[in-house]
Amino acid sequence: MKWLPKPRNSKALASSLLHISSLSFIRPLSNAAADVWSPSFVHPTAIVHPNATLGQGVSIGPFCTVGSSVKLGNACKLYPGSHIFGHSQLGDNCILMTGAVVGDELPGKTMIGSNNIIGHHAVVGVKCQDLKYKDGDDCFLDIGDNNEIREYSSIHRSSKSDDQTVIGHNNLIMGSCHVAHDCKIGDHNILANNTLLAGHIVVEDYIHTAGATVVHQYCQLGSFCFIGGGSVVSQDVPKFMMVSGDRAELRGLNLEGLRRRGFSDTEDPDQRFASSIPQDFYASE
């Protein structure tokens, strides 16, 4: 591998590793520094391909890998032992925690917006687990801004070249969740730990799943619905509803969720948000 960095002498390397805990790359930039980027930092043990594109103020920690087609936005931070491969792009101020893996050496792209956090040992933008995927086909993942994807979660690319896996903005995907190929997730959703979404699922906006929720492929979860813990969802869930059970059944309106979002007791939630979903949200269906 011609692009492996030439290691420094062992004494200097050992000395540098002793100071990992105090390195500047593990500290987020302050607001005052947002407009004045600090110099980029690349640890001597990191492997960064010379063709990779690095923005200003990027910090790459020990034992990280950055592939040849990767683009890192300004002020991105790669914690020790995180990796990014293939045609992958991070927007500004993204963070890869220790052990996170983004992208794969596959045709297609993994596009991630700004201000996203990829948690410890999360795997994002890799090959799907669908047998209909054909080796060599383009596959895509598109993630918006301000998402937090917690530890050990997995998010896969699409299963075919004319589709893509999509995650919008301001979502919290808690630990050990799975988002399979070709899912479409909107904005402001909370997927609690061990939520498992099979392929081709549509998740609208402001949805909350409790822990250990399982959703069957091709289901659609309507905006502002709540899914109780341990539920197995095998049918579509209407907007504003609360469901739970194996198999999940309607339990009434998600009244607490609607109140938290500012709805009054007399307001028709369907009227307020009738046009809230972009017209092209289902364009790839």
Image: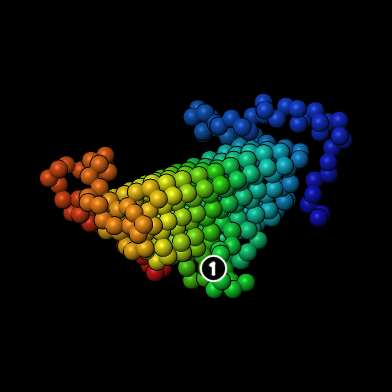
Q: Is residue 130 left or right of residue 173?
A: right
Q: Quick check: 136 left or right of 12? A: left
Residue 61 pos. (x, y %): 68, 38
- Residue highlighted by disc 1: 130
Residue drawn 25% across and 52% down?
Answer: 251
Q: Quadrant of residue 218?
A: bottom left
Q: Is residue 27 above or below residue 276?
A: above
Q: Nearer the viewer, residue 141 or 206?
A: 206
> How packed is label 1: few (under 14 Cα within 10 Å), some, or many (20 or more)?
some
Amino acid under label 1?
A: Asp
In the picture, the quarter occupied by the N terminus is bottom right
Residue 120 position, x and y percent, is 58, 42
The kind of secondary structure element at disc 1 is loop
User: Going by the picture, which residue comes out furthest to the front?
Assistant: 246
Q: Residue furthest left?
A: 266
Quarter of the image for the C terminus: give it: bottom left
Badge count = 1
Q: Nearer the viewer, residue 207 or 170?
A: 207
Can you give x and y, in whole percent of width and height, for residue 91 in the image?
Answer: 53, 47
